[in-house]
Image (cartoon, coloured by chain):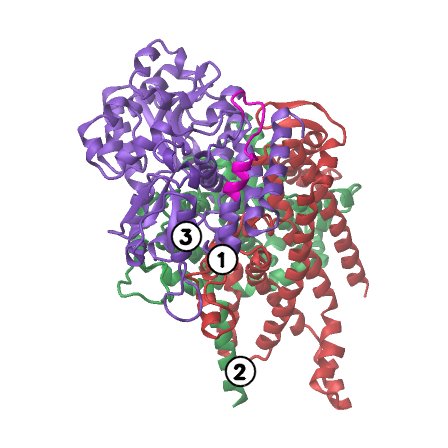
C-alpha cells in the first residue's frame, strides 16, 4: 500500500495527459501514415508518402526557416531587452522602480489575441500611428506597408512577440541579478575594475544558467506559437510569414489533407523533443556548476 | 540629478512599451467612423464610453465573461489539485519509472495545439462533451497540468524535508504532512502557479475557438474575434472588449505580484 | 473547510454545465456572417416561425463567415453540426458529394417550392441530380467607383479594359503635395484568399474565359485571354502603380476604410458594398457598373458574364428533425421572406421571381443593374475541388503574377497544371 502511494498520486494527472494528450498524439501518428481526408475519413495506409509530401513542399522549408528565425531571433532580442530592463530596474530608484516594474510587465499579461490586433492597428499602412511617426520623422514614406509586404511581415510579427515575451525575461533576470553575491562586486571595485568590466566579468557569467534556461524555453515556446502569426497575418502575405504551427492548420483545415497535417505535426514534435533534450542537458549542466 | 534623468528615461520607456495598450484604450472610446483617420488622432471630438456599453448589446459579452470565469477558475482548481498531488509524488518519493513519468509530462508541453485538435475534437464529440463547459475545462486542465506540475515540483523542492520528517516522527501521516505542513509553506509558490494557470486558461484562444460553437459556452477571446465580421469590423467595441478583458489578469497580477515573481524564479531555476 | 468549499464549487459548476432538457423539438440554426440588418431580420423571421410552429424551438448561433468552411468541415466530420445553416452555394458540390447536405428535392412539396425561384439561380444549388439547398442571397460582382473622386476628376466609370486602366492611372495621385502618392485607382483584397479569387475571376469571365470545361474535366483558365486579363492587373500594379501597394494584406475592412477615406477610387465588389460603406460613412455615394470588358468586346458590354455567387440555406443530412428543418428552411426562404431583400438593404439581391419582378425592385438603386448582371452571370464550376483550387492555387499564383514574381503566363500555366492534378485525383 505504501509503495503504491506515489503512483496513486500520479494517477489523476496521468489520466488527463493520456486521454487528452497521448491519445491524440498516437492518433496523429497513425494518421500521418494513412490516407486521411476530412471528408472521407481514413482510408488505408500510405507509408511514408505523407512525410515525403511534407519534405518536398517548399512551403514546409520556408515555414521551417521562418519559424527558426522567429524563435531564435525573437527570443534573443527579447532576452537582451529583458536584461536591459532588469538592469534598469535593479538600480532601485525607489517607488518609481516599483511602479515602472509593474508597467513593464503589462505586455505579458495581455492576451496574445489582443496584442496581435493592437499591433495590427499600430502597423496599419494608412492609418497606423507607427507609420505616422516614422513618416513625420522622414524615415519612411507615408503609407509604407508593413504587414502587407512579404519582406517585412515576419519581422512585424516578431516585434509583437518580443513585446509580449521580454517581461518574462526581465523578471527572471531581475531575480538573477539580485541573487549575485555582493562580495564579487566589492572585490572587483577594490581591484579598480570599471563598470563595463564588472558587467562582462561578474554580471553576465552569473546569469549564464538563467540565460540558457530562458533561451531554450523561449525557443520552444516560440516554435509552438500559433496565435500571434494567425491573428496578425495568417501566414501571409503570400506565405512570407508562415510558421510551422500555422502550417499545420493550413494543411489540415484549409487544404483538408489530414495525413499531411498529421505528418507535419509529428515532425514538429520530433523537433521540439530534440530541443527539450537540449534543455534538460543545459539544466543538468547548470545544476552541476 | 542622475536619478531624475533615469526616472525620465524610465517613464519614456513605459510610455513606449504601453503604446499598443494606450492605442487600444483610445480606440475603445471613439465612435466607429473616427477609428481610422489620417493623421491618426489620440483623441477625437466625440470620445465617450459608449462602445463599452454597446458591446454588451452587439454580442452577449456578459455570457462570454461568465463562461471565461467558469472555465478559467475550474481549470485552475483542477490543475492545482491534481498538479500538487503529482508534484508531491515527484518531490517526496523515489520510485521506479519516476524519470519516465517526468519525461512524459515534460514532453506533453511540446505538442503543437494544431496537431492535437482534430483527434481531441472527435474525442469530445464521442464523449458528448463538445461545446460544453466540462469539455473545455478538461482540455484546458490537461494542457496546463504539465507546466503546473513542473512549477509546483520546483516549489516543493525548496521546502526542506526535515520539516516534514519532524512532523512524521510526531505521528503525522504522509498526506497530513502534505496538507498541514507543505501546502502552507508552499503557498507563495501555489499562488504563483494559480495565477499562471488562470492566465493560461483565461487567455486561451485556439482550443476555445474550435471546441465550442454556441454563445452559451463561448469564451471572451473567441468573442473578441467575432467583432471582425464579414462586412463590418466594429473596432471600437472590440478595443473596449479587449481592455475590459485585460483587467482581471492585471488586477490579479498586481495583487500577487511579489509572491508570483518569487515563486516563478524559484520554480524555474529548478 | 477547504474541502467542502471545493466540493461545493465543483458541484455548482457541474450543475451550471448541465443543459436544460426541454420538451419539444429544438432546431439548431447557424448563421454565418451578415450585416447587423440581416441578423436582425433573421431573428425576427425565426421568431415568427416559432410562433406559427408551437413545439419547435430554434436556437440561433452567429458565426464568422471567414471560417465557414473550416467550422463546417470540423463539425460534419465529427458527426455534428447544425440542422439548418446558410452556406455557400458552391458547397453544394463539395458537401453534396460528401453526403453532408440533405438533397431537398426529396421533400414531397419540392416541385411547388421550386417554382418560387428564378430557374438559373436555383440551379446554383444543384450538384449532379440533387438540389442541396434553397437559394437565398444572389450576388453578382461589379465595379464600384468612388463618385466623389470620379466627379472631381471629371471622368465617367470605365467600360473597357483600356478605359479602366486609364481611369485608374488618372485617379492615382499625390493629393496633399508631400511627394507621396496617397490616392490609388484600384484597391484589391489580397488578404482574403477566397475573396481575392472572387474579385479576379470576373475579369476572366468578362473576357469569355472559362475556369473549366463544361464536363468539369479540364482546367481552362490559362487560355490566352485569361493571361491577358491577369496581365492587365499585373501591368496596373507594376507599371502604372495604380493599385494600392499593401493589397496583399487587405481584407474587406481595409478596403472599406480606403474607399471611404478617398484613398481608393475603385473596387470590385457586390451588393453589400454600398451599405457597408454607408454604415461607416453615411452618405458616401458610388457608381455601380459592370466589370469592364476587353476593348474588342465592347459590343457585348451588357451581356458578357460576371461572377455569380450565392448563399443558400441547407439542411444537415444527419439532422434528427429533417421535416421540421425543411419547414424552417421554407419559412426563411419563401417569397414573403425574400421581399425583405428588396425592401431592406440586406446586402444581396433577392432570388424569387415575385420579388425580382416587383414594383419595388425596379425603383431601388442598383437593383436593375444587379438583376441584369445576374441574368448573364455564371457561378464557379460545380466541381467538389473548386473552392480549394480557387483559394489555394488560383489566388497565390495570380498574386505572384501581379507583384511580378512570375509572368502572367507562367503563373497561370503553373496554376493550371496544379489544378489539373487536383482534378485528376493525383497529388
Looking at the colours in the rendered structure, which chain would you say is drawn in purple? C
Tags 2 and 1 both on a single chain: no
As measured in the structure, the alpha-carbon distance from the residue carrying label 2 to the one carrying label 1 is 27 Å
Above or below: residue A71 compared with residue B232: below
Describe the element under mark 1 as helix, strand or loop.
loop
Give the number of the disc on residue C166: 3
Magenta-span inclusion, residue B99: no
Residue A110 marker: 1
Residue C222 highlighted magenta (yes or no): yes
Q: Nearer the viewer, residue A209 or B56?
A: B56
Give the secondary structure at mark 3. helix
Residue on which disc 2 sits: B6
Label 1 CA crowd tier, 10 Å (few <14, some 14–19, many 20+): many
Chain colored red: A
Q: What is the magenta range? A: C213-230
Name the quadrant of the C terminus of chain C.
top right
Pointer 3 chain: C
Measuring from the top left, give residue B256's x and y in whole percent.
Answer: 51, 61
Amino acid at each position: 500500500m505504501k509503495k503504491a502511494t506515489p503512483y496513486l498520486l500520479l494517477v489523476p494527472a496521468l489520466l488527463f495527459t493520456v486521454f487528452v494528450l497521448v491519445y491524440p498524439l498516437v492518433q496523429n501518428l497513425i494518421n500521418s501514415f494513412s490516407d486521411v481526408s476530412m471528408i472521407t475519413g481514413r482510408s488505408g495506409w500510405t507509408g511514408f508518402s505523407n512525410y515525403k509530401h511534407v519534405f518536398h513542399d517548399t512551403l514546409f522549408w520556408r515555414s521551417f526557416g521562418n519559424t527558426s528565425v522567429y524563435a531564435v531571433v525573437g527570443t534573443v532580442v527579447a532576452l537582451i531587452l529583458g536584461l536591459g530592463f532588469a538592469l534598469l530596474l535593479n538600480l532601485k530608484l525607489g517607488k518609481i522602480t516599483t511602479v515602472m516594474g509593474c508597467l513593464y510587465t503589462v505586455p505579458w499579461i495581455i492576451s496574445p489575441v489582443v496584442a496581435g490586433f493592437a499591433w495590427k492597428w499600430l502597423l496599419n499602412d494608412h492609418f497606423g500611428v507607427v507609420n505616422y511617426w516614422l513618416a513625420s520623422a522622414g524615415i519612411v514614406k507615408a503609407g509604407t506597408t508593413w504587414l502587407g509586404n512579404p519582406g517585412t511581415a515576419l519581422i512585424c510579427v516578431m516585434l509583437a512577440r518580443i513585446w509580449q515575451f521580454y517581461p518574462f525575461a526581465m523578471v527572471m533576470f531581475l531575480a538573477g541579478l539580485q541573487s549575485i553575491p555582493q562580495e564579487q562586486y566589492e572585490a572587483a571595485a577594490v581591484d579598480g575594475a570599471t563598470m563595463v568590466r564588472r558587467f562582462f566579468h561578474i554580471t553576465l557569467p552569473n546569469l549564464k544558467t538563467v540565460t540558457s534556461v530562458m533561451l531554450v524555453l523561449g525557443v520552444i515556446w516560440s516554435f509552438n506559437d500559433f496565435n500571434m502569426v494567425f491573428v496578425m497575418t495568417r501566414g501571409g502575405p503570400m506565405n512570407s510569414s508562415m510558421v510551422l504551427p500555422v502550417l499545420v492548420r493550413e494543411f489540415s483545415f484549409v487544404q483538408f489533407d489530414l495525413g499531411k497535417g498529421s505528418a507535419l505535426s509529428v515532425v514538429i514534435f520530433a523537433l521540439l523533443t530534440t530541443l527539450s533534450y537540449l534543455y534538460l542537458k543545459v539544466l543538468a549542466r547548470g545544476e552541476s556548476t | 540629478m542622475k536619478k531624475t534623468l533615469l526616472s525620465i528615461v524610465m517613464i519614456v520607456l513605459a510610455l513606449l512599451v504601453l503604446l499598443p495598450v494606450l492605442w487600444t484604450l483610445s480606440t475603445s472610446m471613439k465612435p466607429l467612423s473616427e477609428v481610422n483617420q489620417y493623421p491618426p488622432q489620440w483623441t477625437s471630438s466625440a470620445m465617450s464610453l459608449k462602445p463599452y456599453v454597446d458591446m454588451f448589446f452587439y454580442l452577449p459579452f456578459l455570457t462570454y465573461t461568465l463562461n471565461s470565469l467558469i472555465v478559467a477558475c475550474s481549470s485552475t482548481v483542477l490543475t492545482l489539485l491534481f498538479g500538487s498531488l503529482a508534484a508531491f509524488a515527484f518531490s517526496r518519493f523515489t520510485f521506479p519509472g519516476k524519470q519516465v513519468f517526468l519525461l512524459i509530462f515534460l514532453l506533453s508541453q511540446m505538442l503543437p495545439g494544431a496537431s492535437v485538435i482534430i483527434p481531441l475534437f472527435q474525442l469530445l464529440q464521442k464523449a458528448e462533451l463538445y461545446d460544453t463547459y466540462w469539455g473545455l475545462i478538461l482540455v484546458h486542465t490537461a494542457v496546463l497540468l504539465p507546466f503546473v506540475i513542473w512549477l509546483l515540483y520546483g516549489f516543493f523542492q525548496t521546502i526542506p524535508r526535515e520539516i516534514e520528517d519532524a512532523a512524521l516522527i510526531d505521528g503525522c501521516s504522509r498526506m497530513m504532512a502534505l496538507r498541514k505542513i507543505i501546502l502552507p509553506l508552499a503557498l507563495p509558490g501555489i499562488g504563483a502557479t494559480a495565477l499562471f494557470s488562470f492566465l493560461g486558461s483565461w487567455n486561451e484562444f485556439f482550443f476555445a475557438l474550435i471546441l465550442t460553437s454556441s454563445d452559451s459556452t463561448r469564451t471572451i477571446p473567441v468573442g473578441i474575434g467575432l467583432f471582425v465580421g464579414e462586412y463590418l469590423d466594429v473596432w471600437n467595441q472590440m478595443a473596449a472588449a479587449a481592455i475590459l478583458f485585460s483587467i482581471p489578469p492585471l488586477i490579479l497580477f498586481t495583487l500577487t505580484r511579489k509572491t508570483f515573481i518569487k515563486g516563478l524564479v524559484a520554480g524555474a531555476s529548478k | 473547510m477547504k474541502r467542502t468549499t471545493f466540493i461545493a464549487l465543483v458541484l455548482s459548476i457541474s450543475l451550471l454545465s448541465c443543459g436544460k432538457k426541454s420538451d419539444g423539438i429544438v432546431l439548431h440554426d447557424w448563421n454565418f456572417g451578415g450585416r447587423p440588418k440581416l441578423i436582425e431580420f433573421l431573428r425576427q423571421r425565426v421568431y415568427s416561425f416559432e410562433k406559427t410552429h408551437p413545439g419547435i424551438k430554434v436556437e440561433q448561433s452567429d458565426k464568422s463567415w471567414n471560417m465557414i468552411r473550416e467550422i463546417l468541415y470540423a463539425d460534419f466530420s465529427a458527426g455534428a453540426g447544425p440542422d439548418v445553416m446558410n452556406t455557400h452555394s458552391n458547397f453544394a458540390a463539395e458537401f453534396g458529394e460528401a453526403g453532408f447536405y440533405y438533397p431537398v428535392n426529396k421533400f414531397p412539396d419540392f416541385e411547388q417550392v421550386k417554382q418560387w425561384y428564378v430557374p438559373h439561380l436555383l440551379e446554383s444549388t444543384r450538384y449532379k441530380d440533387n438540389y442541396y439547398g434553397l437559394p437565398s442571397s444572389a450576388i453578382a460582382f461589379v465595379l464600384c467607383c468612388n463618385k466623389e473622386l470620379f466627379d472631381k476628376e471629371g471622368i465617367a466609370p470605365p467600360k473597357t479594359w483600356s478605359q479602366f486602366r486609364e481611369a485608374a492611372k488618372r485617379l492615382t495621385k499625390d493629393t496633399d503635395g508631400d511627394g507621396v502618392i496617397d490616392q490609388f485607382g484600384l484597391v484589391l483584397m489580397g488578404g482574403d484568399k477566397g475573396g481575392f479569387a472572387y474579385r479576379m475571376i470576373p475579369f476572366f469571365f468578362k473576357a469569355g474565359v472559362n475556369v473549366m470545361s463544361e464536363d468539369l474535366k479540364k482546367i481552362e483558365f490559362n487560355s490566352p485571354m485569361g493571361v491577358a486579363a491577369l496581365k492587365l492587373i499585373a501591368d496596373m500594379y507594376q507599371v502604372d502603380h495604380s493599385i494600392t501597394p499593401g493589397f496583399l494584406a487587405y481584407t474587406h475592412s481595409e478596403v472599406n476604410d480606403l474607399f471611404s477615406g478617398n484613398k481608393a477610387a475603385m473596387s470590385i465588389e457586390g451588393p453589400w458594398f454600398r451599405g457597408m460603406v454607408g454604415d461607416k460613412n453615411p452618405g458616401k455615394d458610388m457608381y455601380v457598373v459592370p466589370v469592364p470588358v476587353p476593348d474588342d468586346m465592347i459590343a457585348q458590354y451588357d451581356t458578357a458574364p460576371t461572377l455569380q455567387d450565392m448563399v443558400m440555406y441547407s439542411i444537415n443530412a444527419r439532422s434528427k428533425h429533417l421535416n421540421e428543418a425543411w419547414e424552417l428552411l421554407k419559412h426563411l426562404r419563401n417569397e414573403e421572406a425574400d421581399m425583405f431583400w428588396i425592401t431592406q438593404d440586406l446586402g444581396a439581391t433577392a432570388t424569387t421571381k415575385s420579388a425580382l419582378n416587383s414594383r419595388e425592385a425596379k425603383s431601388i438603386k442598383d437593383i436593375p443593374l444587379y438583376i441584369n448582371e445576374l441574368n448573364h452571370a455564371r457561378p464557379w464550376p460545380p466541381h467538389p475541388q473548386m473552392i480549394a483550387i480557387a483559394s489555394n492555387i488560383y489566388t497565390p499564383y495570380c498574386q505572384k503574377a501581379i507583384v511580378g514574381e512570375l509572368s502572367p503566363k507562367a503563373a497561370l500555366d503553373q496554376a493550371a497544371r496544379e489544378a489539373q492534378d487536383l482534378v485528376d485525383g493525383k497529388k
